[in-house]
Image (tube, grey):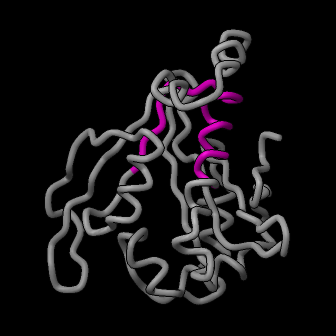
Amino acid sequence: MLFESERIVLRKATAADAELYHAWRNDLEVMRSTNPSLDIYDLEETRQFVHQVILGSPSSKSYILIDKISETPFGITSLINIDSKNRNAECIIDIGNKAYWGKGYGTEALKLLLDYAFLELNLHRVSLRVFSFNDRAIKLYEKLGFQREGISRQSLFREGAWHDIIHMGLLQHEYVNGCPDDFEAAVTKA
């Protein structure tokens, strides 16, 4: 199924997810490697963020990551800045529940999102940005086929030091090479 893998189900994010996202958004260990602006947010600020950014943008699609067996929500992944004319978007992922770190859930979740982006939406390109100190994420993205496209030098100040932001991208035909043979037939029909 398109929104389901061996261990994960993607569920469309809703306004009811604000409190769940609030816990992740205020966990500095979770946000340290994904959010350029670390801060502590009150629940109303998070509700506004969820309403305006996660749910309110017509150019984004956000999904809560659910553990298929325990039905525990453990993160969020999104396609943002979807440009239908030029067939590209940016992807993001946050694994908010640290019990799911380092166990392959990020890879599995991004494969689901990329399958949706390339197979269903027929996007040509998906990009992302990653902080240069986030070695685990960089390895994950490279494993999925993302290539480094550029660097915004010293554009993130974190913990008293300047860090680069690495820009990465993946083209549809590059992703196809890592997918089953019937992918090309599916894309041709799209």
Residue 171 placement: quadrant: top left
Up/down of 25 relative to 105, above or below: below
What quarter of the picture does the C terminus occupy?
top right
Splitting the image into 4 quarters, where does residue 107 fall? Answer: bottom right
| 145 is higher (above) or lower (below) than 66 | above
Is residue 142 within the magenta segment?
A: no
> Could you say where residue 153 lies in the image, as x and y percent from the top left?
14, 56
Main SS, magenta residues: helix
Q: How many labels does the image show?
A: 0
Above or below residue 143? Residue 74 is below
- Is 122 a magenta residue? yes
- When asked about the image quadrant of residue 59, the answer is top right
- Looking at the image, which residue is at 68% across and 37% down? 116
Q: What stretch is highlighted in magenta?
A: 109-128
| Residue at (39% x, 78% y) in the render | 32
Task: Identify the residue shown where x is 39% and y is 72%.
Answer: 33
- Towards the viewer: 159 or 1: 1
The quadrant of the image that shows the N terminus is: top right
Residue 133 at what x, y percent from top left? Answer: 26, 69
Q: Position of residue 72 (x, y in %)?
A: 79, 75
**68 left or right of 39 in image:** right
Q: Where is residue 121 in the image (x, y as percent from the top left)?
A: 67, 29
Q: Report the residue at 42% width, 68% height from top.
A: 34
